[in-house]
Image: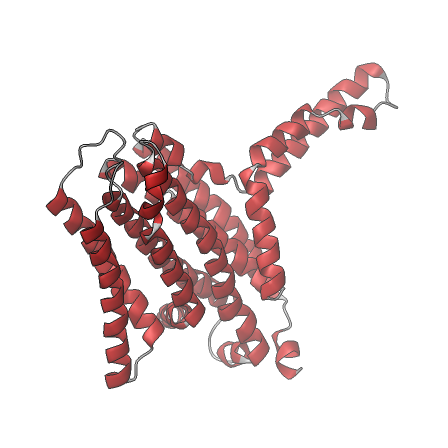
Amino acid sequence: MNIYFRLVQNTFRECVREPVYFLLLLIGVCMIGILPTFTMYVFREQIKLVVDSAMAITLVLGLITATLCASHTITREMRNGTVLLLLSKPVTRWSFILAKLTGLMAALTMFTLLLGSAGFSAIMIAKDQFRIDLPVMAAYFLLLALCCGAAGVCNYLKGVCFSSYASIFMTCAVPLFSIAVFLIRGVPDDEGFVAPSQYIAAVLLLFPAVWIMGAIAAALATRVGVVANLTVCSLLFLLGLISKFISRNWAQGTGADSMFSWLPLEIAEPVANAFKSICGAVARLFLPDWQYFWMADALASHTQVPASYVIYAFIYCTLYAGAWSALAIALFHDREVAKDAIN
C-alpha cells in the first residue's frame, strides 16, 4: 500500500510539473478573468455570460489537460522504459494503472477547483450591468502575478519546479481571494447575481465530468499516442453532448423497421422495437451524457440544485469512470511495454 501511495504522489507531481499543465491553467484563469470585460455588450445578462463561459472553459480545458497528462504519465513512460523499472519491483500492473488514475484525478481536481474559484471571482467583478469592478479585477490579476513571482523566487532560491509551485500557489490563493471579495464587497444589488450556494453546487458537478474525461484518456493512453487520444476524447466529448438525441433517434428511427421487413409482419415490429431499444441503451451506455453535469441553465433561472441530484451525479461518475478504469486495467494487462522501449 505504501508503494501505491508513492506512485499516486509521483503521478500527481508529474502532472503538475508539466509546463503544459501550468500553461493551460494560466490560460484558463486569465480567460475567465477577462470575461467581465465582455459584459458591457449585454443587457442584464452579464452574470449568465460569465457563468456559461467560465464553465465551458473549465470543461474544454479539462478535456485537453486530462488527455495530455494521461499521455505524459502513461504513454510516455511506456515508451521511455520507466514502466519496465517499476514492474521489476513489487508493483502489479493493475496497481500501476490505478495509481496513475488516482494521481491524474488529483491533478484534475486541483485544476477544476482553481478554475471554479476563478469563475466566482469573475462573477463578483461583473456584478453590475453598467460597470465592472476594476479594483477587484486588478487585484485578481495582481494576485496571479504574485503567485507566479513567488514560484519564480522559490525556483531561483531552492531549485524547485516553477510550474508545480505556481499552480499550487494559485490554487491556494484564488479560492481565498474569491471568499474575501465576497465578504468585503457583499451581495451585489442585482437580480441576476448567483448565490454562492447555487454556484458551489453547479461547480461540484464539473468535478465528475472532468474525472470521467480523465478515466477515458487514461484508458486510451495504454494503447494510443497523444494525438489519437486527444482525437478520440474530443469525439466522445462532442457525441456526449448530444447523447440523448442519438439514443432517441435510435429508438424512434425507421432504419430498423426496414432492416427486419423480410420477417413476417407480426414478428418484424416487436423485433425492430427490441433492436432499437437495445441500440439506444448501448448508445447511452458508451456515450457519457455531459448534460447531467451542466448546470448553467439552472443557475440562469436561479434554481437550487438538489443535494440528491449531486449525489446521483457522483454515483453516475463512479460507475462510468469505474468502467473505463476496469477497461484501462484490461488493456494494460497484456500490453507489451518492452516493445516501445526497445524501439
Dividing the picture into quadrants, the one containing residue 268 is top right
Picture coordinates of residue 168, whole percent (x, y): 28, 66
Task: Say which residue appears at 58% left-offset and 47% top-offset.
Answer: 236
Dividing the picture into quadrants, the one containing residue 151 is bottom left
Picture coordinates of residue 39, whole percent (x, y): 33, 41
Is residue 236 among what the camera can see?
A: yes
Eyeballing the image, is 248 above or below 215? Answer: above
Task: Say which residue appears at 32% left-offset and 40% top-offset.
Answer: 40
Check the image and name the residue furthest to the top: 266
Q: Quadrant of the N terminus?
A: bottom left
Picture coordinates of residue 186, whole percent (x, y): 13, 40
Q: Is residue 182 left or right of residue 72?
A: left
Of residues 209 and 330, the one nearer the viewer is: 209
Is residue 287 among what the camera can see?
A: no
Eyeballing the image, is 279 above or below 110? Answer: above
Check the image and name the residue furthest to the left: 184
Dividing the picture into quadrants, the one containing residue 277 is top right
Of residues 96 and 146, the one nearer the viewer is: 146
Picture coordinates of residue 58, whole percent (x, y): 41, 50
Task: Say which residue appears at 30% left-offset and 69% top-offset.
Answer: 166
Q: Is residue 236 left or right of residue 23?
A: right
Q: Quadrant of the C terminus?
A: bottom right
- Render colour scheme: secondary structure
Q: Is residue 339 left or right of residue 263?
A: left
Eyeballing the image, is 293 above or below 95? Answer: above
Q: How many marks?
A: 0
